[in-house]
Image (tube, rainbow, N blue to C red):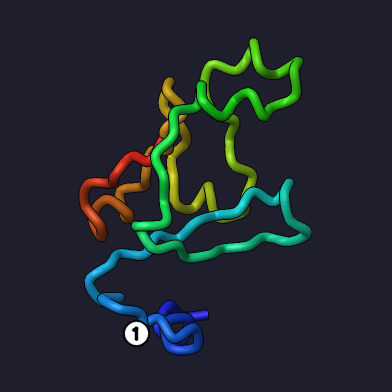
Amino acid sequence: VCVCQWVESNGILQMLGATARPFYMVLVDVRDVESPVVTYVPEHMLESVKFNEVKKFLPKELQEEKKKPPEVVHPFVYSLFYGQNKNGDYLPTDELMARYGEFKNFQ
């Protein structure tokens, strides 16, 4: 689905100030859903959290060994990112960097 179709079909333009608010494409980990899902989230709905704050939700055996967030399992990850750095931040491809410039880090 084209983002333009998504915007139109979901009434995004009717939202107060929607054209001034950035939306972020979010890849939902396929381990959490039955098939690959891509969703769009307005910036004001995103919350910055540190991995140490959320790793308590991992199984006990993984809590101690995990130094960085686990990799997101989604078929689009490899076409959008080169991988993760030592902190677990995703490294965008040159194409994404050329199109969007600097990325905000929500981790």
Q: Is residue 1 left or right of residue 11?
A: right
Q: Residue furthest top?
A: 64
The one nearer the camera, 14 or 65, is 14
Q: Is residue 50 left or right of residue 13?
A: right
Q: Residue at x 26, y 76 (%)?
A: 17
Using the image, determine if residue 28 lies above or below residue 58.
below
The one nearer the camera, 85 or 46, is 46
Residue 1 % position (x, y):
53, 80
Residue 76 % position (x, y):
55, 55
Give the quadrant of residue 37.
Answer: bottom right
Q: Residue at x 28, y 67 (%)?
A: 21
Q: Residue at x 60, y 17 (%)?
A: 66
The one nearer the camera, 81 or 28, is 28
Q: Residues within 10 Å of mark 1 (few under 14, many from 20)?
A: few
Q: Residue at x 40, y 83 (%)?
A: 4
Q: Residue furthest front?
A: 16
SS label for mark 1: helix
The one nearer the camera, 57 or 89, is 57
The residue labelled by disc 1 is 13
Using the image, determine if residue 47 lies above or below residue 42.
above
Give the quadrant of residue 87.
Answer: top left
Q: Is residue 95 left or right of residue 87?
A: left
> How many numbered circles does the render carry?
1
